[in-house]
Image (cartoon, rainbow, N blue to C red):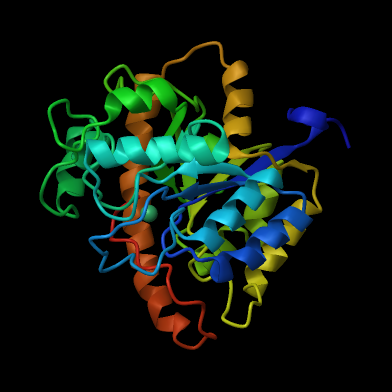
């Protein structure tokens, strides 16, 4: 077999950005141990500070204010996983709490996060809601799924504003997602700068898989073969606390099989930050061609609609499978 384009002559790249919704030590430790055993070092987001006001949907989740969880995350970092940000905490945070969260992150991990992904409909999310997209048609359709209100992470003067800190401290932020296992096919110019969204240094995209069942589907044999054939890049955006690990501690078999099969192929398995650094160093241009952006927005809207429909179908089927760990609360519709 001839050499592929990735480090070490590998033929494709695969990693995960794990949104921390619902995560506890018990419901994610087995999947992290499996990833490690397979030689995969992925990216785990955290919430650095607790949410004392409570959270109706995400309240079972742990933060760095929980000592056993903090110890587990520090240990993951020592094992080579990348720790990233999912906002200050599980509900909206004003600027003061975001500052405290970033400082907390730096204290614990020795530096600011390099990667950030917005959480659900937190008001401090950056370039969120309709501000994610520009295409008038896509904005019209997306507006129908969105709850009211505004997202102020990038709005100077808003109590939620932290765009200046994001630009100074964070290198990569996730925006649009797709259903294609090859994220690079959806967004060949990743990572890219967007002059209309200057509080983010570099944007990246991801392949969406809400939880374990969706990830199993994404990693089915035909998709794995496609990723390798296209010499592609897959950044899975998922919630590892959601349906990957059963109460017994067993990992969902279809996910295990998919990951093991991928690990047996000539792939490169870096963290998200490492992968984006590598892609960026190879780009001649920083911008996103207008045609690519237009295509991405429309594809994102279409894929979101497909996922909504699939989710409804799976919800019925899931009642017949063994119960997963609690937590991993439902992501509010259309959040990614
Ligand atoms: Zn989230």
Please report the residue visible at 17 percent of the width from the left and 34 percent of the height from the top: 136
Quick check: 52 above or below 40?
Answer: below
Please report the residue visible at 54 percent of the width from the left and 67 percent of the height from the top: 212
Question: 257 or 197, which is in the foreground?
Answer: 197
Dividing the picture into quarters, in which one does residue 102 lie?
Answer: top left
- Whether residue 202 appears in this view of the structure is no
Question: 82 or 252, which is in the foreground?
Answer: 82
**Residue at the limit of the structure toward the right, as seen here:** 1
Quick check: 71 above or below 83?
Answer: below
Question: What is the x, y in percent for residue 254?
Answer: 65, 70
Dividing the picture into quarters, in which one does residue 329 lie?
Answer: bottom left
Please report the residue visible at 43 percent of the width from the left and 55 percent of the height from the top: 65
Q: Image quadrant of ligand 1?
A: bottom left
| 80 on left or right of 93 | right
- Whether residue 32 appears in this view of the structure is yes
| 298 on left or right of 224 | left
| 199 on left or right of 67 | left
Question: What is the x, y in percent for residue 186?
Answer: 48, 37
Quick check: 124 above or below 20?
Answer: above
């Amino acid at each position: 077999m001839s050499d592929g384009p990735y480090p070490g002559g590998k033929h494709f790249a695969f990693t995960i950005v794990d949104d921390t919704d619902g995560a506890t030590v018990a419901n994610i430790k087995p999947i992290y141990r499996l990833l490690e055993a397979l030689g995969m070092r992925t990216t785990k987001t955290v919430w650095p500070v607790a949410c004392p006001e409570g959270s109706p949907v995400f309240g079972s989740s742990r933060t760095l204010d929980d000592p056993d969880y903090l110890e587990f995350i520090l240990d993951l970092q020592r094992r080579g996983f990348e720790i990233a940000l999912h906002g200050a905490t599980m509900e909206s945070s004003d600027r003061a709490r975001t500052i405290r969260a970033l400082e907390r992150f730096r204290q614990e991990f020795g530096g600011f996060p390099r990667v950030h992904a917005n959480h659900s409909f937190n008001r401090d999310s950056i370039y969120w809601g309709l501000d994610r997209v520009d295409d008038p048609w896509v904005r019209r359709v997306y507006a129908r799924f969105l709850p009211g209100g505004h997202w102020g992470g990038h709005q100077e003067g808003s109590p939620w504003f932290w765009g200046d800190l994001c630009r100074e401290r964070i290198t990569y932020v996730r925006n649009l997602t797709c259903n294609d296992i090859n994220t690079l096919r959806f967004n060949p110019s990743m990572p890219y700068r967007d002059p209309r969204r200057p509080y983010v240094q570099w944007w990246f995209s991801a392949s969406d898989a809400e939880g374990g069942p969706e990830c199993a589907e994404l990693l089915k044999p035909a998709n794995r073969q496609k990723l390798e054939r296209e010499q592609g890049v897959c950044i899975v955006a998922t919630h590892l606390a959601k349906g990957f690990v059963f109460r017994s501690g067993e990992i969902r078999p279809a996910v295990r099989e998919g990951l093991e099969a991928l690990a047996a192929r000539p792939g490169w398995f870096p963290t998200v930050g490492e992968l984006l650094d590598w892609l960026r160093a190879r780009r001649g241009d920083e911008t996103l061609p207008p045609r690519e952006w237009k295509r991405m927005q429309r594809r994102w809207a279409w894929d979101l609609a497909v996922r909504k429909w699939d989710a409804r179908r799976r919800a019925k089927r899931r009642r017949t499978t063994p119960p997963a760990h609690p937590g991993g609360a439902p992501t509010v519709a259309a959040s990614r």
